[in-house]
């Protein structure tokens, strides 16, 4: 059972605000949506579907219908998972009681053999398991398993866990014991079963996860055969497009991240989790190759993945258009999942670097600062009149849409931001790994009540302070392994005022004998006494970054970064004309913290020029230019001040 | 009857080669394709469809089927039109005999009432006129009318003309006399009827063209109503998307060029032709507004139009992506049509400037230099591995595909390049307008055998020489109006060695009293004697051009131009790495003519830098750069030397 969720108390100015929003706004709103209690919203019917399924099982008939997407059950699951996490640090008896009732309802919608899916129970009882490609039975099971694990870890209550263990047994019987063919169209159950295995320790759960991972793509024609025999369809998906569902080859032979990007990273997460558990070398290697393909050829500078709305998918290496990007919020969340599991294979800071990139940029951009609206799609360039309007840009909305009913991204953001501890930390035996820098206090395992306090103004301030607190003047022996962020050019780490690690541009990283540097982590092992303090200085300043020239969309352009944050330029700060702007050489002028702006951001001011628009399309002379100061804000905060132009990559003058 | 086609003898090094290719390669190949005589090609069946229709009419039954697209008849029409033009300067008795046979066959497929369409005659005799939105009856009629006019003008034979007059009468009866509702889904018949009117002088033809133009969009819901009642479909097109078929409003109220770009410019061509004929002010104004919208907001620097493959359509103002451009060859041909008719409304050189841009860049790029392969889609950036492969780039093929069967662009290129006289010249009363600079000799109208000779090495050489030849030392009084190209910064025009017009960067255009300058045309009126010579010097040099900053795809970038030609940079000339290149300030180094390269081109050498590709996607330092000389070739000649990167717009270093 995961120790971190329960034992880390978030006390962080930055994430605290997000957590508060999710607990106070997002989770209650979503519950109302699931219960069809929001008058202006399209009805969800997700909880009513469970009621109808329960009635069907109890009475052989029901008085309503199934309504919604074939995967409507997963909306309830994701909400339960987010609610579970929120209960850890924000106990709420009434919420817990309502969650328990929903769990009881889920239990009463479960068949005697463990089968659980309201779509098939209510609407298509004769078609169970006939459409693995489209019908999301295993996907919904996966999300309910994740909810079960989360609820168990958060509350200690095992009723949903038992329901989902029974469901997992039902699936095991069919696919392992009875050797039914096939694998899920939308990966998810693999990563969920691995979490279930972690929670229960039952080998069957690991075995079932391994089964779905190992069988995938072995028969690349499975969906074609299924299509030929099934006689019904959900959306009429193309079974020939094996790349879409990552079944073009057995998973150990995959070399490119392809297809639907959420499916892809969910699958790779399951693979990495299994590989970390089993040490399977072929699987480890495949995960590394896929990770490298994403992060070295197919990822936006904001940590967004999936270049196209057509199939919400990866396209080809280095094809990263800014204005038509899909870069789904859920896909970046999935990239965080994948990173977290890669860290369990190998503690290498590059995994955490990209996890941090995805979190602080695309994932946070997914939610409006007031928690009320969400981006599913996260373009790097927006032009009113084109974005959201041109037929090629219908998906790149220039403002976050109202969130009606339930859907994937909002609850995914909610569950991620309420379980930040699981990404910030990991533990092995005697070592505590600090992957992300999040303020709070962590109860140290098996350490007689010792705690590790973290104080930081990250991502805007340069210092992260770790302080050990022990009880009754005891000491505690452990290793603290701190990630040294890859983006940072100057680092100074002190243990009780003695420098143990320095990074400079001239000399790179140097460490003293007391500490160890390995794969980007600084290992500090000692008998920690009460009050021992580790002070990390991670130099931050606004700077220009560049793209590999292989990315056609960004040739001749620069982006702006400060620390982990990627910046963007919005019209509202720049006389409503961003397209004419180019960045000049020279110092970033200021980087003042503005507490009143956008919930508190550091604004970059950069010397630039603006080319004036003209009446003609093409000119034989360079358009007239004027010197300007360009104002840039963090990408995560864009789109909170009305419709305007936005750009991450600007030409360099 | 058009005088120009018959009376201009092309003697031009540049277009001569194209005409030869079309006459010797394209037209014979296409005829074989129409006759299903190309073993490896998908069958066309277009001529066989007429045979089956004739049989059906004669015997009440047929022994075969209709095969192909619903508009398969138009393939025969376009071929006949190109063949007609080719017969003017390249008489070929056998070709003419075969064309006559095909015309006779077309006649025998015509119903007694004049109706003519093989799809409906053979396959759907009960569904005539029930699906104007999709079924292309009026579109096919339009192309057959164009063929009839061309064949009549080229050969003097009126059999096809009479067939199509009868067909036009049948359409007139239905839509004008019997007041049947509706207008064509694909405009074409409007421009064709205007040509028919020009050839026959029959008011009915003008009236029918005006009817279809005036009725369009008056009932914007017509296709919705038709869809509701028709009970069958060709492709299931969306009747709600009125912008697609330009029926969102009555044509006089249109302000934006929208929807399928070929349909759009075909419609606007018909409108402009009608407006030129009638002087209808509302229609003139609408044409001007639409022209401006295209050329000032929605056109590529290559004269390509239609930014997206989704509907082969215009999108929004300033949305001109380079790599996913559709820019269909046929749409640029349609832009030439539109320009030509605008010139009949007003002799303003900006129409001819854009006609020239479309012709020398996108239209010519449509055909491989050996005449064997064709681009339908003309992107401004191509990257092997992405272009033609990514799901968003399937249409932007990096090499011209083999031309199987019949389709729109190849025969459209063929008919345009064989009727270049119709674009190069126009005549009003006593004035000959030279819109394009094409070598050859033009018989002057009503001028006792006088001729105007044109000698030029355009588009590579700077001089265009017009020489008058009269018979028996007579003089001939007329006005020669020569377009002064808008792209040209230095001009010198001499009449018999006396300068009459100068353009300099400092002083603009100055003319002497003997000549007149109006809307970009230089009017030289005199009693021309035998041997009188007008020598135009149009300064050409390689230069950088810029885009309006409103075009997001081109901010910070430059393109290269020399004279009317837009240049591009290909991998084969640039160490197979175009994406890393930026253009530096400084002189264009050389612009040598290379007669052996790509059929003879002037190559531009430009100082630049190349940024080296890296292993990482994003870099905190500018990628390493090396100084290079960038080699650029004319855009029309790209893609003739194998798969490689290509770019029109390059970052400015």
Image (tube, coloured by chain):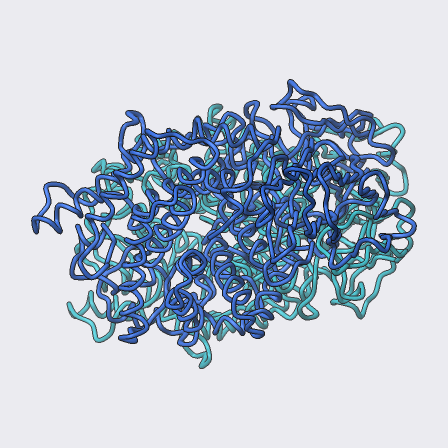
Chain colours: A cyan, B blue
**Quarter of the C terminus of chain A within the rendering:** top right
Q: Which is nearer the eye, B66 or B161?
A: B161
Which residue is outermost to the bottom?
A39
Residue B297 placement, left or right of B581 = left
Is residue A440 visible to us here? no
Is A92 placed above or below A168 here? below
Tell me residue A1's x, y (percent).
50, 47
Above or below, comparing residue B519 to residue B59 in the picture: below
Q: Between B339 and B499, which is closer to the camera in this rendering?
A: B499
Residue B497 left/right relative to B174? right
Q: Which residue appears at 43% of the width and 69% of the height? A: B210
Which residue is more in the foreground, B627 or B347? B347
Q: Look at 44% across and 52% down and name the residue there.
A: A146
In-image side of B448 versus B128 (left or right): right
Q: Position of residue A462 (x, y in %)?
A: 83, 49
Q: Nearer the viewer, residue B620 or B236?
A: B236
- Residue A251 lies in what quarter of the image? top left
Q: Where is residue B41 in the image (x, y as percent from the top left)?
A: 32, 29
Q: Can residue A556 be seen in this view?
A: yes
- Relative to residue A83, is residue A512 drawn left or right? right
Q: Compared to B71, does A68 lie above or below?
A: below
Among the 4 quarters of the image, the one containing residue B431: bottom right
Total label count?
0
Where residue A106 appears, x then y in whole percent?
33, 64
Q: Which residue is drawn at the image coordinates 83% and 65% (left, top)?
A: A594
Q: In this view, does B629 lie above or below A404?
A: above
């Amino acid at each position: 059972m995961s120790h971190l969720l329960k034992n880390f108390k978030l006390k962080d100015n930055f994430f605290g605000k997000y957590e508060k929003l999710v607990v106070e706004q997002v989770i209650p709103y979503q519950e109302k949506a699931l219960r069809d209690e929001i008058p202006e919203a399209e009805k969800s019917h997700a909880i009513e579907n469970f009621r109808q399924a329960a009635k069907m099982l109890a009475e052989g008939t029901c008085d309503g219908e199934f309504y919604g997407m074939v995967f409507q059950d997963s909306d309830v699951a994701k909400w339960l998972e987010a609610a579970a996490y929120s209960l850890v640090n924000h106990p709420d008896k009434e919420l817990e009681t309502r969650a328990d009732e929903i769990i009881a309802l889920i239990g009463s919608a479960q068949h005697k053999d463990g089968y659980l899916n309201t779509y098939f129970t209510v609407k298509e009882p004769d078609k169970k398991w006939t459409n693995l490609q489209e019908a999301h039975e295993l996907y919904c099971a996966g999300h309910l398993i994740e909810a079960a694990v989360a609820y168990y870890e958060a509350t200690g209550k095992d009723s949903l866990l038992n329901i989902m263990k029974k469901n997992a047994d039902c699936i095991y019987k069919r696919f392992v014991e009875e050797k039914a063919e096939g694998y899920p169209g939308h990966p998810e159950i693999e990563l969920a079963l691995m979490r279930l295995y972690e929670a229960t320790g039952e080998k069957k759960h690991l075995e079932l996860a391994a089964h779905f991972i190992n069988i995938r793509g072995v028969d690349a024609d499975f969906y074609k055969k299924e299509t030929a025999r099934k006689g019904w369809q959900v959306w009429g998906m193309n079974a020939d497009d094996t790349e879409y569902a990552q079944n073009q080859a057995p998973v150990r032979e995959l070399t490119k991240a392809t297809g639907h990007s959420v499916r892809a990273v969910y699958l790779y997460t399951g693979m990495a989790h299994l590989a970390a558990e089993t040490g399977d070398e072929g699987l480890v290697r495949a995960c590394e190759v896929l990770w490298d393909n994403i992060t070295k050829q197919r990822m936006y500078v904001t940590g967004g993945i999936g270049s196209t709305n057509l199939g919400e998918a990866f396209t080809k290496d280095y094809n990263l258009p800014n204005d038509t990007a899909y870069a789904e919020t859920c896909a970046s969340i999935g990239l965080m999942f994948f990173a977290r599991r890669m860290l369990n294979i190998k503690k290498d800071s590059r995994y955490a670097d990209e996890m941090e990139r995805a979190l602080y940029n695309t994932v946070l951009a997914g939610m409006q600062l007031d928690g009320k609206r969400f981006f599913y799609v996260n373009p790097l360039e927006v032009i009113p009149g084109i974005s959201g309007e041109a037929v090629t840009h219908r998906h790149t909305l220039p403002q976050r849409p109202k969130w009606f009913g339930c859907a994937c991204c909002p609850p995914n953001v909610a569950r991620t931001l309420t379980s930040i501890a699981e990404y910030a930390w990991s533990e092995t035996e005697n070592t505590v790994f600090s992957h992300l820098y999040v303020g709070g206090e962590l109860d140290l395992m098996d350490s007689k009540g010792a705690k590790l306090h973290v104080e930081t103004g990250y991502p805007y301030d340069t210092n992260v302070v770790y302080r050990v607190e022990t009880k009754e003047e005891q000491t505690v022996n452990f290793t603290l392994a701190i990630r040294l962020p890859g983006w940072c050019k100057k680092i100074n780490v002190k243990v009780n005022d003695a420098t143990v690690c320095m990074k400079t541009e001239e000399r790179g990283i140097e460490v003293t004998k007391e500490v160890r540097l390995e794969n980007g982590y600084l290992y500090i092992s000692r008998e920690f006494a009460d009050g021992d303090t580790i002070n990390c200085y991670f130099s931050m300043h606004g700077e220009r970054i560049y793209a590999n020239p292989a990315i056609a969309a960004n040739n001749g352009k620069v982006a702006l970064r400060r620390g982990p944050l990627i910046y963007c330029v919005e019209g509202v700060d720049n006389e409503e004309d961003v397209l004419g702007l180019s960045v000049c050489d020279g110092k970033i002028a200021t980087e003042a913290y503005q507490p009143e702006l956008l919930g508190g951001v550091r604004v970059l001011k950069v010397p630039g020029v603006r080319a004036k628009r003209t009446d003609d399309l093409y000119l034989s002379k360079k358009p007239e230019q004027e010197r300007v100061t360009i104002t840039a804000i963090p990408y995560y905060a864009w789109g909170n001040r009305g419709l305007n132009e936005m750009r991450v990559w600007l030409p360099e003058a």
